Image (tube, coloured by chain):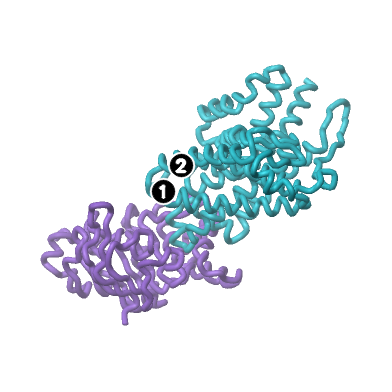
Amino acid sequence: MSLLQVENLTVRYGAIEALRHISFSVNEGEIVTFVGSNGAGKTTTMRTLSGLVRASAGKIRFKGVGIDTLASHQIVKLGLVQSPEGRLVFPDLSVKENLLLGAFARPASNGELQHELEHVFALFPRLKERINQDAHTLSGGEQQMLAIGRALMAKPALLLLDEPSLGIAPLLVQQIFQKIVELNKKQGTTILLAEQNARMALKIAHRAYVLEVGEIVQQGVAADLLNDERLQKAYLGG
Amino acid sequence: MFDLIQYLVDGLAVGSVYALIALGYSMVFGVLQLVNFAHGELFMVGAYFVMYAISLGLPWPVALGLGMCFVGLFAVAMERLCYKPLRGAGKLAPLITAVGLSLLLQNLVQAILGPNPQSYPARVPEGKLSQFFGQYLPDPSQLQIPHLPDGLFDWNDLVIRHRDLMIFTIAVFVTLGLELFLRKTRPGRGIRALALQPNAAKLVGVPFDFTISMTFFIGAALAVVAGLLQGMADNQVTPYMGISSGLKAFAAAVLGGIGVIPGALLGGLVLGIAERLLVGYDLSTYKDGAAFFILIIVLLLRPQGLLGKARMVKV
């Protein structure tokens, strides 16, 4: 059984259907990616999974539990944790306070928290250098690391990453994507990645879904899609 | 010159009551960006509740505790029934609702308990109500009515009344306690996270509805403390005390930087002192306008309030 199983998900904003009957799944240990242009419905999918937006139809099962009616904090408790689009760090709090808030849903002893912090710092040493700095003073790339680190503090069984490359210098994007692979390979973290930068995403993912105006138009093994002619024309600039 | 110092000291007590009410305005605004204009009425209802509870013969700490719980839960119910259904309906609808609630509560209390000021020991107004409840009110001579201390510190003619000092001390400790709660405890951190970045707070697992309810509860409970202090200091409560003190407390919250806890205290004290200064220098006609005049001036120079932070939003 898949870790995450979504069937016929439909989301409406007023009269607009942002998602139309999409079905997909994520298996344990995978990196799965959603690619598609702006407005295709990637962020809506992510927000619906986390309970920030309500589905108007369809089923979402995570670890076999129906989560489409749960509140956000209950979903986080189950281990489905998101690093959102635009990063949404807590601006006036320090890097450390931001990370500690990441563990909000999971009451832990100080020792455990310290251990988790070290773990995040091992992945993103830059955050350790900035540990006492307010989050709003960080660069875009550093804020992205912080957003991912904050999500990791919740010990996710499934990590949702929404547009981690958005507004970040290309060199840092490379670095962050390497870290995503590292997380998946070394710690076996399952990852669902929504990304406009289709080439980067397809390179690191196992499987992929292509979203176009709220519908899944293509799906398959990421490496195959990378060589797909139609996809190359539409998203990969070649 | 000497008078000036005296007025400053006198203003602290007045300002402390504003500050205690302002904390609730500030917290609720912090998490919901909602100006809960009915918050002043919670202060008024709290003042009545505690006065009647004491007049029924309850010791004042019990009366205060009951009042904080009752008005706190009342505020939670108000949020659930009146504000929650309007989430996502823009900012105007909840604002108008708040004004409506304020008027409703004020008129309800006036209709039930009468428009005249009540003082210790409180009486149930003549009529059907008194037939029901009048018999339960104990003999006034048996009551232990709480008093603020009467003493004075007299230091080279600078007179500080003990009661003013006590009210000021309570306000300072409550503000410190609240700030500590928000920084050091888990539920407190949840409130702060929600105020800073609501969606991120939800994504780290802060329970949204529960945290909002808790914010309303705490704000209302603090307003009841203010209600008791004001009721004791003036030995009177009226159905209109909420609207006058409430509006000034709102001005105090904005003046100090709405959403910033120490700002509410500072704002309250500044307004209290300003009022006393005007009264002291024979300008008491303008007393009630002072709060808003200062507010306008400060907002022109520092739109974020005295302690508020102005920050560019990075996108």
Q: Give yes or no for contact between labels 1 and 2 (Cβ–Cβ under 8 Å).
A: yes
Q: Which chain is purple?
A: A
Viewer-closest of B188 and B217: B217
Q: Is residue A160 above or below residue B218?
A: below
Residue beneath the point at 32% across and 55% down: A166
Q: Horizontally, is B122 left or right of B244 in the view?
A: right
Q: Which residue is mark 2?
A: B97
| Residue at 80% across, 44% down | B146
- The tint chain B carries is cyan
Q: Is residue B212 above or below residue B239?
A: below
| Quadrant (top left, top right, bottom left, bottom right) of the N terminus of chain A | bottom left
| Residue that extends furthest to the top in the rendered view of this protein | B282
Name the residue that disc number 1 marks.
B86
Identify the amino acid type marked 1.
Leu
Indicate the position of residue A47 as horizontal and vertical percent values. Answer: 34, 60
Count of numbered marks: 2
Inspect the image, locate mark 2, and give the three-letter code of the amino acid beneath it. Answer: Thr
Q: Estimate the x, y position of residue A164 in percent, counting from the top left.
A: 34, 60
Question: Hey, which quadrant is residue A168 in on the image?
Answer: bottom left
